[in-house]
Image (spheres, rainbow, N blue to C red):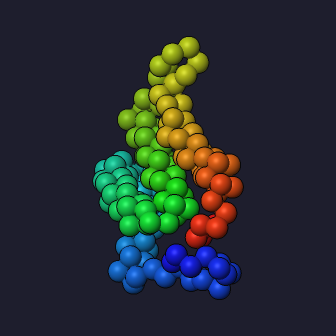
Amino acid sequence: MTDNTNQENQYYNIPIAYRKMENLHIIFWLFKDIAWCMVWRPLGVMMIIPTLFISIVIAWRTRQIFSELCHNLAIVVWITANSFWMCSEFFKVDNVIVYKDITVKHLAMIPFLTGVLILAFYYLIHKPRHEKETATL
């Protein structure tokens, strides 16, 4: 997709195998979060692996389109933060003080903020400087 003359008429095609993987990713993610909600520790912890792995594969496969890469990397760090937070609750260390008023659960803010920074970089710096670049958002 290098022709940027009329972006409104361009298509972002996803191979069916990639789409199936993305849909499977949603299933794993839902099971992970259901397990968290229901405090099913083994299932929740087990679902981290396929959920995180597939999100990394999706980010890698979309690396040719920078807007997709940035959004998918934000998802990778979101799942990382979410999984860390879940595990901190499962293993009852979420309220353990790390430093002053900062608890173990608050450490999940590191990957959450990393995702915000990735998207801030994309929208505030990269996108304005590359207006003619093919982007999905």
Question: Which sits in the foreground, 131 or 10?
Answer: 131
Q: Residue at x 33, y 57 (%)?
A: 53
Residue 25 x/y as whole percent: 41, 67
Check the picture and name the quadrant holding the C terminus. Answer: bottom right
Q: x, y percentage for residue 89?
A: 45, 38
Does residue 20 appear anywhere in the picture? no
Q: Can residue 64 be seen?
A: yes
Q: Name the residue at the top extreme.
A: 100
Residue 52, located in which quarter of the rendered image?
A: bottom left
Taking the spot 43% from the left edge, 74% from the top edge, the residue there is: 23
Quadrant position of residue 117? top right
Residue drawn 60% across the image and 47% down it: 121
- Residue 3 located left or right of residue 61: right
Direction from residue 117 to residue 30 in the image, left or right: left
In the depicted structure, whether residue 102 falls above or below residue 4: above
Q: How many marks?
A: 0
Asked if residue 30 lies left or right of residue 4, the reply is left
The residue lying toward the viewer, choosing from 105 and 130, is 130
Across and down, in percent, residue 81 comes to 48, 43
Near-viewer residue (71 or 24): 71
Q: Residue at x 43, y 62 (%)?
A: 63
Q: Is residue 16 above or below residue 105?
A: below
- In the shown orientation, is residue 114 left or right of residue 58? right
**Where in the figure is residue 72, as x and y percent of width and height?**
49, 59
